[in-house]
Image (cartoon, grey):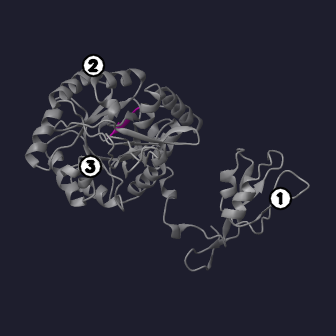
Amino acid sequence: MADLSVDFAGIHSPNPFWLASGPLTNTQYQVMKAFDEGWGGAVWKTVGEPVINVSSRLGAIDYGGRRMMGLNNIELISDRPLDDNLREIAEVKRLYPGNALVVSMMFESVASVWRDMVKRVEDTGADGIELNFGCPHGMSERGMGSIVGQVPEYTETITRYAAQATSLPVIVKLTPNVTDIRPPGRSAVSGGAGALSLINTINSVMGVDLNTWRPLPDVDGQGSHGGYCGPAVKPIALHMLSSLYNDPGIRVPLCGIGGIETWRDAAEFMLLGASVVQVCTAAMHYGFRIIHEMTEGLNDYLTERGLSRVADLVGQAAPRIGGWKDLRLSTSFQVVAHIDPATCIGCNLCVVACDDGAHQCIDRPSHQKAPVVREEDCVGCNLCSLVCPVPGCIAMNPVDKGYIDTWSGHELPAQ
Protein backbone atom coordinates (compact mmCIF):
# COMPACT_ATOMS: atom_id res chain seq x y z
CA MET A 1 0.00 0.00 0.00
CA ALA A 2 1.32 3.41 -0.96
CA ASP A 3 1.05 6.38 1.39
CA LEU A 4 -1.48 8.77 -0.15
CA SER A 5 -1.17 11.42 2.56
CA VAL A 6 0.32 14.74 1.50
CA ASP A 7 1.54 17.98 3.00
CA PHE A 8 0.73 20.89 0.73
CA ALA A 9 2.16 24.29 1.70
CA GLY A 10 1.94 23.24 5.34
CA ILE A 11 -1.57 21.79 5.02
CA HIS A 12 -1.86 18.08 5.84
CA SER A 13 -4.33 15.97 3.91
CA PRO A 14 -5.04 12.22 4.08
CA ASN A 15 -4.96 12.06 0.28
CA PRO A 16 -4.26 14.48 -2.58
CA PHE A 17 -7.86 14.70 -3.80
CA TRP A 18 -9.69 17.89 -2.86
CA LEU A 19 -13.03 19.26 -3.94
CA ALA A 20 -12.64 22.59 -5.74
CA SER A 21 -14.48 25.71 -4.74
CA GLY A 22 -17.89 25.63 -6.39
CA PRO A 23 -21.53 24.63 -5.99
CA LEU A 24 -20.52 21.30 -4.44
CA THR A 25 -18.70 22.97 -1.47
CA ASN A 26 -21.41 25.50 -0.72
CA THR A 27 -22.63 24.08 2.61
CA GLN A 28 -21.59 22.20 5.71
CA TYR A 29 -23.78 19.28 4.67
CA GLN A 30 -22.02 18.88 1.31
CA VAL A 31 -18.46 19.12 2.64
CA MET A 32 -19.15 16.71 5.51
CA LYS A 33 -20.75 14.23 3.11
CA ALA A 34 -17.68 14.48 0.87
CA PHE A 35 -15.31 13.87 3.77
CA ASP A 36 -17.37 10.86 4.84
CA GLU A 37 -16.94 9.43 1.33
CA GLY A 38 -13.16 9.83 1.54
CA TRP A 39 -12.17 13.15 0.00
CA GLY A 40 -8.94 14.41 1.50
CA GLY A 41 -9.83 18.08 1.43
CA ALA A 42 -12.19 20.73 0.20
CA VAL A 43 -12.03 24.36 -0.81
CA TRP A 44 -15.15 26.13 0.44
CA LYS A 45 -17.19 27.98 -2.16
CA THR A 46 -15.87 31.51 -2.47
CA VAL A 47 -16.99 33.77 0.36
CA GLY A 48 -17.34 37.52 0.08
CA GLU A 49 -20.04 40.09 0.18
CA PRO A 50 -23.16 38.01 -0.60
CA VAL A 51 -24.49 38.29 -4.15
CA ILE A 52 -27.78 37.54 -5.85
CA ASN A 53 -27.35 34.87 -8.49
CA VAL A 54 -29.31 34.21 -11.69
CA SER A 55 -31.37 31.32 -13.00
CA SER A 56 -30.54 29.26 -14.99
CA ARG A 57 -26.81 29.01 -14.37
CA LEU A 58 -25.26 26.03 -16.16
CA GLY A 59 -24.83 24.99 -19.78
CA ALA A 60 -23.02 21.98 -21.21
CA ILE A 61 -21.54 20.55 -24.38
CA ASP A 62 -22.22 16.88 -25.08
CA TYR A 63 -20.00 15.07 -27.55
CA GLY A 64 -20.38 11.68 -29.18
CA GLY A 65 -22.94 10.51 -26.66
CA ARG A 66 -20.82 11.78 -23.79
CA ARG A 67 -22.73 14.10 -21.45
CA MET A 68 -21.08 17.23 -20.05
CA MET A 69 -17.82 17.01 -21.97
CA GLY A 70 -17.59 20.70 -21.22
CA LEU A 71 -19.52 22.68 -18.63
CA ASN A 72 -20.20 26.42 -18.56
CA ASN A 73 -21.41 28.30 -15.49
CA ILE A 74 -22.54 31.87 -14.91
CA GLU A 75 -22.95 31.46 -11.15
CA LEU A 76 -21.16 33.93 -8.93
CA ILE A 77 -19.65 33.51 -5.48
CA SER A 78 -21.64 32.35 -2.44
CA ASP A 79 -25.06 33.96 -2.12
CA ARG A 80 -25.27 32.86 1.51
CA PRO A 81 -24.60 35.27 4.41
CA LEU A 82 -20.93 35.45 5.33
CA ASP A 83 -21.67 34.68 9.00
CA ASP A 84 -23.47 31.48 8.00
CA ASN A 85 -20.53 30.34 5.92
CA LEU A 86 -17.98 31.07 8.63
CA ARG A 87 -20.04 29.31 11.29
CA GLU A 88 -20.36 26.18 9.14
CA ILE A 89 -16.67 26.22 8.20
CA ALA A 90 -15.74 26.24 11.88
CA GLU A 91 -18.13 23.38 12.59
CA VAL A 92 -16.79 21.23 9.74
CA LYS A 93 -13.22 21.76 10.90
CA ARG A 94 -14.18 20.84 14.46
CA LEU A 95 -15.83 17.61 13.34
CA TYR A 96 -13.21 16.67 10.71
CA PRO A 97 -9.85 17.87 12.09
CA GLY A 98 -7.90 15.43 9.93
CA ASN A 99 -9.19 16.71 6.60
CA ALA A 100 -7.85 19.73 4.75
CA LEU A 101 -10.28 22.65 4.72
CA VAL A 102 -9.37 25.74 2.71
CA VAL A 103 -11.58 28.80 2.30
CA SER A 104 -11.83 30.54 -1.06
CA MET A 105 -12.09 34.32 -0.69
CA MET A 106 -12.90 37.30 -2.89
CA PHE A 107 -13.25 40.89 -1.67
CA GLU A 108 -12.76 44.38 -3.01
CA SER A 109 -9.19 45.57 -3.42
CA VAL A 110 -8.91 47.36 -0.09
CA ALA A 111 -6.19 46.38 2.36
CA SER A 112 -8.30 46.90 5.48
CA VAL A 113 -11.12 44.73 4.09
CA TRP A 114 -8.75 41.86 3.33
CA ARG A 115 -7.07 42.20 6.71
CA ASP A 116 -10.37 41.97 8.57
CA MET A 117 -11.82 39.17 6.47
CA VAL A 118 -8.67 37.05 6.60
CA LYS A 119 -8.72 37.29 10.40
CA ARG A 120 -12.35 36.16 10.48
CA VAL A 121 -11.55 33.14 8.30
CA GLU A 122 -8.51 32.36 10.43
CA ASP A 123 -10.72 32.29 13.52
CA THR A 124 -12.74 29.40 12.05
CA GLY A 125 -9.77 27.06 12.37
CA ALA A 126 -9.53 26.57 8.60
CA ASP A 127 -6.21 25.23 7.31
CA GLY A 128 -5.62 27.84 4.62
CA ILE A 129 -7.14 30.40 2.31
CA GLU A 130 -7.39 30.45 -1.46
CA LEU A 131 -7.55 33.82 -3.19
CA ASN A 132 -9.95 33.62 -6.11
CA PHE A 133 -8.31 35.64 -8.88
CA GLY A 134 -9.91 33.61 -11.62
CA CYS A 135 -13.68 33.97 -12.06
CA PRO A 136 -14.15 35.37 -15.59
CA HIS A 137 -17.77 36.48 -15.23
CA GLY A 138 -19.85 38.69 -12.99
CA MET A 139 -17.27 39.39 -10.32
CA SER A 140 -14.72 40.61 -12.86
CA GLU A 141 -17.16 43.35 -13.86
CA ARG A 142 -17.02 44.44 -10.21
CA GLY A 143 -13.24 44.73 -10.16
CA MET A 144 -12.60 41.27 -8.70
CA GLY A 145 -11.94 37.76 -10.00
CA SER A 146 -10.07 37.44 -13.29
CA ILE A 147 -9.61 41.19 -13.64
CA VAL A 148 -7.16 40.82 -10.74
CA GLY A 149 -5.51 37.67 -12.06
CA GLN A 150 -4.97 39.21 -15.50
CA VAL A 151 -2.86 42.09 -14.14
CA PRO A 152 0.30 40.88 -12.38
CA GLU A 153 0.60 44.09 -10.37
CA TYR A 154 -2.92 43.64 -8.97
CA THR A 155 -2.20 39.99 -8.25
CA GLU A 156 0.89 40.86 -6.23
CA THR A 157 -0.75 43.71 -4.34
CA ILE A 158 -3.85 41.84 -3.17
CA THR A 159 -1.88 38.69 -2.41
CA ARG A 160 0.27 40.82 -0.13
CA TYR A 161 -2.84 42.25 1.58
CA ALA A 162 -3.86 38.73 2.54
CA ALA A 163 -0.44 37.22 3.22
CA GLN A 164 0.59 39.99 5.60
CA ALA A 165 -2.61 39.55 7.60
CA THR A 166 -2.40 35.83 8.35
CA SER A 167 -0.14 33.00 9.36
CA LEU A 168 -2.27 30.58 7.34
CA PRO A 169 -0.96 29.28 4.02
CA VAL A 170 -2.14 31.54 1.19
CA ILE A 171 -2.96 29.80 -2.09
CA VAL A 172 -3.57 31.97 -5.16
CA LYS A 173 -5.97 30.56 -7.75
CA LEU A 174 -4.93 31.79 -11.20
CA THR A 175 -7.04 32.58 -14.24
CA PRO A 176 -6.27 30.86 -17.56
CA ASN A 177 -7.61 33.89 -19.42
CA VAL A 178 -4.12 35.27 -20.05
CA THR A 179 -1.55 34.94 -22.81
CA ASP A 180 1.15 33.65 -20.45
CA ILE A 181 0.39 32.14 -17.03
CA ARG A 182 3.89 32.73 -15.69
CA PRO A 183 3.87 36.51 -14.99
CA PRO A 184 0.80 36.41 -12.71
CA GLY A 185 2.20 33.27 -11.08
CA ARG A 186 5.48 35.00 -10.31
CA SER A 187 3.63 38.05 -9.01
CA ALA A 188 1.55 35.93 -6.65
CA VAL A 189 4.73 34.37 -5.27
CA SER A 190 6.31 37.82 -4.90
CA GLY A 191 3.23 38.92 -2.98
CA GLY A 192 3.65 36.12 -0.46
CA ALA A 193 1.68 33.19 -1.89
CA GLY A 194 2.71 29.90 -0.35
CA ALA A 195 1.19 27.92 -3.21
CA LEU A 196 -0.63 28.33 -6.52
CA SER A 197 -3.73 26.57 -7.84
CA LEU A 198 -4.77 26.43 -11.48
CA ILE A 199 -6.66 26.62 -13.68
CA ASN A 200 -9.82 28.50 -12.93
CA THR A 201 -12.50 28.53 -15.62
CA ILE A 202 -12.05 29.72 -19.20
CA ASN A 203 -14.10 32.60 -20.55
CA SER A 204 -16.73 31.22 -22.90
CA VAL A 205 -20.16 31.37 -24.47
CA MET A 206 -21.65 27.89 -24.37
CA GLY A 207 -23.99 28.02 -27.36
CA VAL A 208 -27.28 29.10 -28.86
CA ASP A 209 -30.54 27.14 -29.07
CA LEU A 210 -31.24 26.91 -32.80
CA ASN A 211 -34.99 26.66 -32.25
CA THR A 212 -35.44 29.65 -29.93
CA TRP A 213 -32.27 31.61 -30.78
CA ARG A 214 -31.72 32.01 -27.06
CA PRO A 215 -28.18 31.73 -25.63
CA LEU A 216 -27.25 28.91 -23.28
CA PRO A 217 -27.65 29.00 -20.35
CA ASP A 218 -30.88 30.92 -20.75
CA VAL A 219 -31.80 33.67 -18.27
CA ASP A 220 -35.22 34.80 -19.45
CA GLY A 221 -34.02 35.02 -23.03
CA GLN A 222 -30.66 36.62 -22.29
CA GLY A 223 -27.21 35.16 -21.78
CA SER A 224 -23.69 36.11 -20.77
CA HIS A 225 -20.15 34.86 -21.00
CA GLY A 226 -19.28 32.37 -18.30
CA GLY A 227 -16.62 30.00 -17.02
CA TYR A 228 -15.80 26.84 -19.01
CA CYS A 229 -14.62 23.70 -17.24
CA GLY A 230 -14.92 19.92 -17.41
CA PRO A 231 -12.91 17.22 -19.24
CA ALA A 232 -12.52 19.41 -22.35
CA VAL A 233 -10.22 21.89 -20.55
CA LYS A 234 -7.71 19.33 -19.25
CA PRO A 235 -5.05 19.86 -21.99
CA ILE A 236 -5.06 23.62 -21.35
CA ALA A 237 -4.67 23.04 -17.63
CA LEU A 238 -1.77 20.63 -18.14
CA HIS A 239 0.03 23.14 -20.34
CA MET A 240 -0.28 25.95 -17.82
CA LEU A 241 0.62 23.73 -14.89
CA SER A 242 3.82 22.52 -16.56
CA SER A 243 4.71 26.09 -17.53
CA LEU A 244 4.66 27.12 -13.88
CA TYR A 245 6.42 24.03 -12.60
CA ASN A 246 9.26 24.48 -15.09
CA ASP A 247 9.63 28.20 -14.35
CA PRO A 248 12.68 28.81 -12.10
CA GLY A 249 10.96 31.92 -10.73
CA ILE A 250 8.19 29.84 -9.20
CA ARG A 251 9.28 27.57 -6.40
CA VAL A 252 6.07 26.95 -4.49
CA PRO A 253 3.84 23.87 -4.54
CA LEU A 254 1.15 23.69 -7.20
CA CYS A 255 -2.41 22.44 -7.03
CA GLY A 256 -3.77 21.14 -10.33
CA ILE A 257 -7.34 21.86 -11.45
CA GLY A 258 -9.14 21.38 -14.75
CA GLY A 259 -10.94 18.38 -16.20
CA ILE A 260 -9.81 15.82 -13.62
CA GLU A 261 -12.26 12.92 -13.63
CA THR A 262 -10.23 9.79 -12.87
CA TRP A 263 -7.09 8.77 -11.03
CA ARG A 264 -5.36 8.68 -14.39
CA ASP A 265 -6.10 12.34 -14.95
CA ALA A 266 -4.80 13.12 -11.47
CA ALA A 267 -1.60 11.15 -12.08
CA GLU A 268 -0.93 13.16 -15.24
CA PHE A 269 -1.30 16.40 -13.30
CA MET A 270 1.05 15.07 -10.64
CA LEU A 271 3.64 13.99 -13.19
CA LEU A 272 3.65 17.55 -14.56
CA GLY A 273 4.03 19.17 -11.16
CA ALA A 274 0.85 19.11 -9.05
CA SER A 275 1.25 18.03 -5.44
CA VAL A 276 -2.52 17.88 -4.93
CA VAL A 277 -5.48 18.17 -7.27
CA GLN A 278 -8.92 19.73 -7.06
CA VAL A 279 -12.03 18.23 -8.66
CA CYS A 280 -15.30 19.98 -9.40
CA THR A 281 -17.21 19.07 -12.58
CA ALA A 282 -16.70 15.31 -12.25
CA ALA A 283 -18.02 15.28 -8.69
CA MET A 284 -20.99 17.40 -9.77
CA HIS A 285 -21.64 14.94 -12.60
CA TYR A 286 -21.17 11.60 -10.85
CA GLY A 287 -21.33 12.44 -7.15
CA PHE A 288 -18.82 12.31 -4.33
CA ARG A 289 -18.54 8.52 -4.65
CA ILE A 290 -15.97 8.85 -7.46
CA ILE A 291 -13.34 9.38 -4.78
CA HIS A 292 -13.20 5.61 -4.18
CA GLU A 293 -12.01 4.90 -7.73
CA MET A 294 -9.56 7.79 -7.50
CA THR A 295 -7.85 6.75 -4.28
CA GLU A 296 -7.83 3.04 -5.09
CA GLY A 297 -6.57 3.64 -8.62
CA LEU A 298 -3.78 5.99 -7.55
CA ASN A 299 -2.72 3.62 -4.77
CA ASP A 300 -2.52 0.70 -7.20
CA TYR A 301 -0.61 2.77 -9.74
CA LEU A 302 1.98 3.96 -7.23
CA THR A 303 2.41 0.42 -5.92
CA GLU A 304 2.86 -1.01 -9.42
CA ARG A 305 5.48 1.63 -10.19
CA GLY A 306 7.35 0.87 -6.98
CA LEU A 307 6.61 4.29 -5.50
CA SER A 308 5.79 4.61 -1.82
CA ARG A 309 4.19 8.06 -1.71
CA VAL A 310 2.53 10.69 -3.87
CA ALA A 311 5.52 13.01 -3.68
CA ASP A 312 7.59 10.45 -5.61
CA LEU A 313 5.37 11.10 -8.63
CA VAL A 314 5.30 14.89 -8.59
CA GLY A 315 7.07 16.57 -11.50
CA GLN A 316 8.67 13.44 -12.92
CA ALA A 317 7.47 14.15 -16.47
CA ALA A 318 7.75 17.94 -16.32
CA PRO A 319 11.33 18.17 -17.69
CA ARG A 320 10.10 16.47 -20.87
CA ILE A 321 7.89 19.50 -21.65
CA GLY A 322 10.10 22.07 -23.34
CA GLY A 323 10.29 24.38 -26.31
CA TRP A 324 9.73 23.29 -29.89
CA LYS A 325 13.38 24.03 -30.56
CA ASP A 326 14.31 21.20 -28.19
CA LEU A 327 12.55 18.58 -30.33
CA ARG A 328 14.37 16.34 -32.82
CA LEU A 329 13.56 17.01 -36.46
CA SER A 330 12.09 14.29 -38.65
CA THR A 331 15.39 14.19 -40.52
CA SER A 332 16.85 12.55 -37.42
CA PHE A 333 13.87 10.84 -35.80
CA GLN A 334 10.35 10.01 -36.82
CA VAL A 335 7.61 7.48 -36.36
CA VAL A 336 5.81 5.62 -39.12
CA ALA A 337 2.43 3.94 -38.99
CA HIS A 338 1.89 0.21 -39.20
CA ILE A 339 -1.57 -1.36 -39.48
CA ASP A 340 -2.06 -4.77 -37.89
CA PRO A 341 -4.04 -6.84 -40.44
CA ALA A 342 -5.14 -9.29 -37.74
CA THR A 343 -7.08 -6.68 -35.75
CA CYS A 344 -8.13 -4.35 -38.57
CA ILE A 345 -11.91 -4.32 -39.12
CA GLY A 346 -11.68 -2.75 -42.57
CA CYS A 347 -13.56 0.45 -41.71
CA ASN A 348 -11.13 2.49 -43.84
CA LEU A 349 -11.35 5.53 -41.57
CA CYS A 350 -7.56 5.73 -41.66
CA VAL A 351 -7.56 5.72 -45.46
CA VAL A 352 -10.01 8.59 -45.70
CA ALA A 353 -8.31 10.61 -42.95
CA CYS A 354 -4.86 10.20 -44.47
CA ASP A 355 -6.02 10.96 -48.00
CA ASP A 356 -8.06 14.04 -47.14
CA GLY A 357 -6.41 15.37 -44.00
CA ALA A 358 -2.81 14.18 -43.99
CA HIS A 359 -0.18 12.87 -46.41
CA GLN A 360 -1.79 10.30 -48.76
CA CYS A 361 0.41 7.38 -47.72
CA ILE A 362 -2.16 4.64 -46.99
CA ASP A 363 -3.23 2.32 -49.79
CA ARG A 364 -6.29 0.07 -49.87
CA PRO A 365 -5.41 -3.16 -51.75
CA SER A 366 -8.39 -4.78 -53.47
CA HIS A 367 -7.43 -8.28 -52.36
CA GLN A 368 -7.36 -7.70 -48.58
CA LYS A 369 -9.38 -6.06 -45.81
CA ALA A 370 -6.58 -4.15 -44.10
CA PRO A 371 -5.08 -1.03 -45.70
CA VAL A 372 -1.30 -0.80 -46.03
CA VAL A 373 0.96 2.10 -45.13
CA ARG A 374 3.69 3.13 -47.55
CA GLU A 375 6.24 3.70 -44.83
CA GLU A 376 8.65 5.60 -47.06
CA ASP A 377 6.00 8.30 -47.51
CA CYS A 378 4.65 8.34 -43.96
CA VAL A 379 5.60 11.42 -41.92
CA GLY A 380 4.34 10.05 -38.60
CA CYS A 381 1.57 12.59 -38.03
CA ASN A 382 -0.50 10.10 -35.92
CA LEU A 383 -3.83 10.97 -37.56
CA CYS A 384 -4.55 7.41 -38.69
CA SER A 385 -3.98 6.00 -35.20
CA LEU A 386 -6.18 8.70 -33.69
CA VAL A 387 -9.19 7.96 -35.90
CA CYS A 388 -8.85 4.16 -35.72
CA PRO A 389 -11.66 2.68 -33.58
CA VAL A 390 -9.66 -0.44 -32.66
CA PRO A 391 -7.18 0.10 -29.80
CA GLY A 392 -3.67 -0.97 -30.77
CA CYS A 393 -4.50 -1.73 -34.39
CA ILE A 394 -2.29 1.06 -35.72
CA ALA A 395 1.12 1.36 -34.11
CA MET A 396 3.46 4.31 -34.57
CA ASN A 397 6.90 2.72 -34.78
CA PRO A 398 10.02 4.83 -34.22
CA VAL A 399 12.72 5.22 -36.84
CA ASP A 400 15.99 6.64 -35.49
CA LYS A 401 18.14 8.42 -38.08
CA GLY A 402 20.77 10.00 -35.83
CA TYR A 403 20.74 13.41 -34.20
CA ILE A 404 20.21 16.62 -36.16
CA ASP A 405 20.18 20.06 -34.52
CA THR A 406 16.66 21.51 -34.73
CA TRP A 407 17.73 24.97 -35.85
CA SER A 408 20.87 24.44 -37.91
CA GLY A 409 20.08 21.07 -39.46
CA HIS A 410 23.63 19.90 -38.67
CA GLU A 411 24.27 16.37 -37.52
CA LEU A 412 25.15 16.02 -33.84
CA PRO A 413 27.06 13.29 -32.01
CA ALA A 414 24.95 10.31 -30.94
CA GLN A 415 23.38 10.69 -27.48
Q: Which residue lies at the image location 51% right of the left edge and 52% below the top edge?
A: 317
Q: What residue type is labelled 2?
A: Leu
Quarter of the rendering containing residue 91 = top left
How far across and down, in percent of the image, does residue 47 sit?
21, 36
Classify 10 Å Cα crowding around label 1: few (below 14), some (14-19), many (20 and above).
Answer: some
Residue sticking out furthest to the left: 112
Evaluate whether residue 14 shows in this view: yes
Residues drawn in magenta: 4-8
Tag 2–tag 3 contact (CB < 8 Å) = no
Magenta region, mostly helix, strand or loop? strand
Q: Name the residue under label 3.
A: 133
Residue sticking out furthest to the front: 212
Considering the numbered disc 1 on the image, is that residue within a helix, a strand or a loop? Answer: loop
Q: Mark 2 points at which residue?
A: 95
**In the depicted structure, whether residue 87 falls above or below residue 155:** above
Q: Residue 383 versus residue 220: which sits nearer the camera?
A: 220
Q: Which residue lies at the image location 57% right of the left edge and 74% below the top edge?
A: 406
**Residue 114 shown left or right of residue 231 in the figure:** left
Q: Residue 399 versus residue 88: which sits nearer the camera?
A: 88
Which comes before the other along the chain, label 1 or label 2? 2
**In the depicted structure, whether residue 66 falls above or below residue 207:** above
**In the depicted structure, whether residue 237 falls above or below residue 412:** above
Q: Residue 364 carries which label?
A: 1
Quarter of the rendering containing residue 171 = top left
